[in-house]
Amino acid sequence: MVALEAGEVQVTHLAKTERVQLPRGSWSSMVISSKQVLGNRSSLGYSVFKPGTALLPVKHNVEEVAMILQGTGKLQLDERAITYKTGDALFIPAGVWHAVINDGSEDVIMVFGFPHPDYPPTESRASK
């Protein structure tokens, strides 16, 4: 990181971030976090979920927002599933167990964010 003045606009690029490998060749990356940006209070991530991907349920200690840029699938909650498609925006309250599922035929591309400077503290559990 370069020393910047307070309030200065900072630019990061997806290609320069570290990928977290997920099942079935899927992956996720934090594009804006304290690793790339100085003094941030929120973070932004980018994920690609390959067809057939079903992640284990997680819950974060802060809310999450997400935008589906491509694809269709489900967000599995404890008692029901919410379907999503290209153009949908999701709001997931803090403490809600959720699992991303791509049951479509194309990659799901999702941008997500948190009111936290990094990927927030998160619990994970095995599927029910």
Image (cartoon, rainbow, N blue to C red):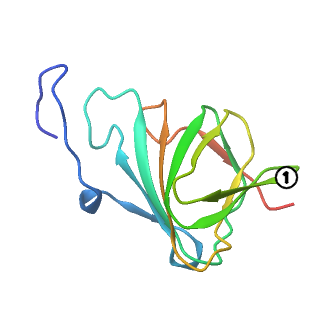
Q: Residue at x 47, y 60 (%)?
A: 47
Instruction: Examine the rendered structure and indicate whether residue 70 appears above or below residue 116.
Output: below
Total label count? 1
Quadrant where the N terminus sits is top left
Q: Position of residue 29 (x, y in %)?
A: 41, 57
Q: Quadrant of residue 11?
A: top left
Amino acid at dot 1: Arg
Viewer-closest of 60 and 98: 98
Residue that numbered label 1 is attached to: 80
Q: Residue at x 30, y 57 (%)?
A: 17
Q: Position of residue 16 (x, y in %)?
A: 24, 58
Q: Quadrant of residue 95?
A: top right
Q: Residue at x 31, y 43 (%)?
A: 35
Q: Taking 45 as reference, is 64 left or right?
A: right
Q: Taking 90 as reference, is 19 left or right?
A: left
Instruction: Examine the rendered structure and indicate whether residue 68 appears above or below residue 64.
Output: below
Label 1, secondary structure: give it: loop
How crowded is the residue under tag 1: few (<14 C-alpha within 10 Å), some, or many (20+)? few
Viewer-closest of 115 and 118: 115
Q: Quadrant of residue 99?
A: bottom right
Q: Taking 91 as reference, is 114 left or right?
A: left
Q: Taking 43 as reference, is 95 left or right?
A: right
Q: Position of residue 66 (x, y in %)?
A: 53, 46
Extreme residue in the front direction: 87
Quadrant where the C terminus sits is bottom right
Viewer-closest of 121 and 106: 106
Q: Position of residue 80 (x, y in %)?
A: 85, 52
